Image (tube, rainbow, N blue to C red):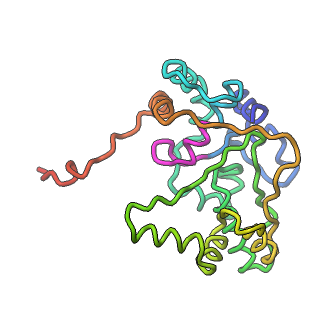
Amino acid sequence: MDKFLSLTRQRLSWNDLHVDRYGISNGNLVVAQTSDICQSNSADSYLGLVASTQHHNAPPTETTSARALARGISSLLLRQGSASDSLYTYYIDSNGISQDPIAVLYEHQYLVYQATYRAAHGTADTERVLLYPRAEMMSQPHFIAPNHKADQLGELLEADPELRRRETQLGYQLVPSGSVDELATYLNGEGIPAPQPSSGEQTVAKMPDWQVLEQMIAAIKQCPKPVSDQDQQKPSG
């Protein structure tokens, strides 16, 4: 990550990296495109990863120093121009190589794209690859059941074979059922390379506490205040 971010600090473009050797031209700055930091958990996670990289591989814990760190790394996040809600769509577009050469996406989005592409073309898309930073950051969604009926749904998501199969089709790595890696089994059956655990030494990047993260986001960009249900019900005019 530090080597990659140094390219942005130097204000190098993709053309400066001689991408013309591959028959393309892209004068944009070398950055990882993210969605809007005010609206996207994946963008916030990337902020946490960059912050950890610049903070001796540890998340900032104190608000004042975290805000200062955020202001210091803001250029590494905002030089990409206007973030788009359609980042994924642009990435998989035929012109993606000139718009979003590197995009911050969830692993499952990429895997679903490859499954869809193979179903349409009979082969995986070898023009797009999935890159993992050396400092890993895991996104682990949880199902929270607020009542008994929701608890029953949670049990189905965990135990029903058809639902688990559908979850793997959506690219999710499930809690292992016995010793079987269901996602790898599905992907291999579809002719798609499955993610492989790293054999080398890995660093786990930890996110700042949510209070600290909110302060960092505020230091980087002025986000619109969320609209409450009460505000939405106020008459206009």
Residue at image x 84%, y 48%?
20
Judge by depth and name the residue closer to the eye, 100 or 141: 141
Q: Is residue 159 left or right of residue 13?
A: left
Please state the horizontal and vertical placement of residue 196, each as a whole percent of the image. Answer: 82, 57
Judge by depth and name the residue closer to the eye, 4 or 163: 163
Q: Quadrant of residue 72?
A: top right
Residue at image x 63%, y 55%?
106
Q: Is residue 237 left or right of residue 8?
A: left
Judge by depth and name the residue closer to the eye, 121 or 169: 169
Residue 7 lies in the magenta stretch: no
Q: Is residue 23 left or right of residue 183?
A: right
Judge by depth and name the residue closer to the eye, 102 or 59: 59
Which stretch did the figure color magenta?
34-48
Image position of 72 with respect to 154: above or below:
above
Q: Quadrant of residue 93?
A: bottom right
Please state the horizontal and vertical placement of residue 177, each as a whole percent of the image. Answer: 70, 69
Quadrant containing the N terminus is: top right
Residue at image x 88%, y 43%?
200
Number of labelled discs? 0
Residue at image x 71%, y 73%?
115
Please state the horizontal and vertical placement of residue 17, each as a whole percent of the image. Answer: 82, 39
Please state the horizontal and vertical placement of residue 160, each as a whole percent of the image. Answer: 59, 78
Q: Is residue 231 left or right of residue 49?
A: left
